[in-house]
Structure formats: structure tokens, C-alpha cells
Image (spheres, rainbow, N blue to C red):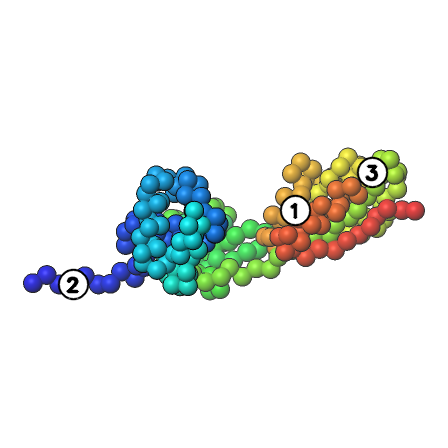
């Protein structure tokens, strides 16, 4: 006698029909009560006739209420079915991310010391760079190859959280040329701000000239905004000298990505 197979842990993924029913229910909920079957069909890559047949079944199953002339609403039963299966899909996605991808994904780090393939390594951030060494760390993995100290090395089966703190962005506002440009910049204040910053960027020629007059060539000019944000995410305190008309938009960008910042108004009277 054939043994009964185990129940599928993610029922919605058992067959394409259930997935299509789920998508159509979501489509109806999104556009109800005026539901355009042609639009749903185009989104799902099926024919309008197939959508019509699915909707008819959903009405018969009590998941959708027909109000005539292409007007439909998802019933309470339909909403509960969607929520139940949405949780199943979310659970499956977590399983893929944590239990599957994490096991096969290979991170790249700098070998903090000589390593041999298979060594258990701690992974940590230092000065904006990802390192792997034999010591214990909040994130642990396995070296995928031999590597000498200072070489790049692959790390697989990473578990835990890489311990690091985000850097702070110092935003220094300078005037456009119409308002005096670099001539109206408090140079001594600028020197004090950039003195110990590992990364300094400039947006606008006025900012570039002001930095050079303060004794520092900018590390970034082209792509400065995104470069500073990337550096801060890797734990590096950075300064960006930026012309006033670009200032507000950049602050909005920092707030949008959740980075902390300090404002310095370098415009001299």
C-alpha cells in the first residue's frame, strides 16, 4: 500500500491553479468593485476567458460576490483565504532567504590573517571594509578557499549579524557663485570639519574650489552623493561640501535612507 505523502508546508505553492486564484483574488481586491478582466489577464499572462472562468469559480466558492456588469467584491471568506496564503508565501520567502540562499551565497571579505579552506571565521567590519579572521565574532562563516593575509577570500554559510555602526554625514553648505561662491566660505571652519574625516566629497565647483583652498582635494566629485551615502552605510564618517541649491534635496535623500547627519552652514556674511 502506497504511503500518503506528507502535507505540503506551503499549500499555495502546490499547483499553478491555486497561485492563479490567489493572484486574481488580489487583483479583484485591488480594483473592486469595477474589475477589468482584460487588465487582470494581461498582468497574469492568461486569456480573459480564463480569468472569467476563475472568477465564476470564485463566486461559486463564496470568495467573490458578483454585483453584475463586471462589478465584483472579495467576500470575507475570500479575504481570509488570501491572508492565510499570503502568510504561507511570506514564510516560504523567509525560508529561502535564511535557510537556502544564506547557505549557498558566498560573501567576499579581506583575510585578516592566513586562512585555509574550511576554516571557521568571524566576519566583521573595520574602517568600512569587511574582514574575515579566525577569532569569534557576532557573524560566523566558513572560508571557501585558502587565502593569505590581505587577500580577498570567500565566506559561505554566514550566520549571525555583522556587527557595525553606520557613519555620520557632515553636510557643509556653501553658496553658489551668484552669492559669492568659494569666496564666501568660512575656510577655517571647513578645515576643522574635514580634518579627521576619512572621506570628503564635493558637489559643485564652488565646493570643489573651497575644499582645495582649505588644503584638501575631495575624494569624490562625480557620484559624490551616492558615494558618501555608501561610505556612511559602511561605518565611515564623511563630509560632503555641497552648494546651497543642492543642499535640501540631499538632506531629503539622507532622511529617506535613515542616515544621521550634522548640518554646517559655511556661508560667511
Q: Residue at x 48, y 48 (%)?
A: 34
Provide the residue designation for mark 3. Answer: 176
Q: Check disc 1 and report its element: helix, strand or loop.
A: helix
**Can I make out residue 114 in this image?**
no
**Can I make out residue 223 in this image?**
yes
Provide the residue designation for mark 1. Answer: 228
Q: Nearer the viewer, residue 262 or 196?
A: 262
- Mark 1: few/some/many CA within 10 Å (<14, 14-19, 20+): many
Q: Give the CA distance from mark 3 to mark 1.
A: 21 Å
Marks 2 and 1, the one that precedes in the sequence:
2
Residue 4 shows which numbered tag?
2
Q: Nearer the viewer, mark 2 or mark 1?
A: 2
Q: Position of residue 186 (x, y in %)?
A: 86, 47
Residue 58, compared with residue 222, is above or below; it is below
Q: Is residue 172 left or right of residue 234?
A: right
* Quarter of the figure with residue 41: top left
Amino acid at each position: 500500500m502506497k504511503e500518503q505523502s506528507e502535507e505540503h508546508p506551503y499549500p499555495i505553492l502546490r499547483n499553478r491553479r491555486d497561485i492563479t486564484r490567489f493572484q486574481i483574488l488580489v487583483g479583484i481586491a485591488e480594483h473592486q468593485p469595477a474589475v477589468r478582466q482584460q487588465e487582470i489577464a494581461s498582468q497574469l499572462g492568461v486569456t480573459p476567458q480564463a480569468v472569467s472562468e476563475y472568477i465564476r469559480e470564485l463566486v461559486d466558492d463564496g470568495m467573490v460576490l458578483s454585483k453584475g456588469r463586471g462589478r465584483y467584491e472579495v467576500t470575507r471568506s475570500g479575504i481570509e483565504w488570501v491572508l492565510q496564503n499570503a502568510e504561507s508565501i511570506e514564510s516560504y520567502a523567509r525560508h529561502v532567504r535564511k535557510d537556502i540562499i544564506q547557505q549557498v551565497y558566498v560573501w567576499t571579505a579581506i583575510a585578516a590573517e592566513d586562512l585555509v579552506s574550511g576554516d571557521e571565521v568571524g566576519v566583521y567590519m573595520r574602517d568600512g571594509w569587511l574582514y574575515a579572521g579566525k577569532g569569534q565574532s557576532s557573524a560566523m562563516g566558513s572560508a571557501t578557499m585558502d587565502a593569505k593575509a590581505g587577500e580577498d577570500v570567500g565566506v559561505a554559510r554566514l550566520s549571525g549579524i555583522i556587527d557595525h555602526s553606520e557613519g555620520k554625514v557632515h553636510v557643509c553648505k556653501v553658496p553658489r557663485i551668484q552669492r559669492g561662491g568659494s569666496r564666501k566660505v568660512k575656510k577655517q571652519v571647513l578645515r576643522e570639519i574635514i580634518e579627521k574625516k576619512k572621506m570628503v566629497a564635493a558637489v559643485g565647483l564652488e565646493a570643489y574650489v573651497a575644499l582645495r583652498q582649505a588644503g584638501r582635494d575631495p575624494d569624490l566629485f562625480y557620484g559624490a552623493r551616492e558615494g558618501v551615502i555608501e561610505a556612511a552605510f559602511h561605518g565611515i564618517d564623511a563630509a560632503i561640501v555641497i552648494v546651497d541649491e543642492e543642499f535640501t534635496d540631499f538632506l531629503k535623500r539622507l532622511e529617506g535612507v535613515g542616515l544621521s547627519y550634522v548640518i554646517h552652514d559655511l556661508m560667511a556674511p
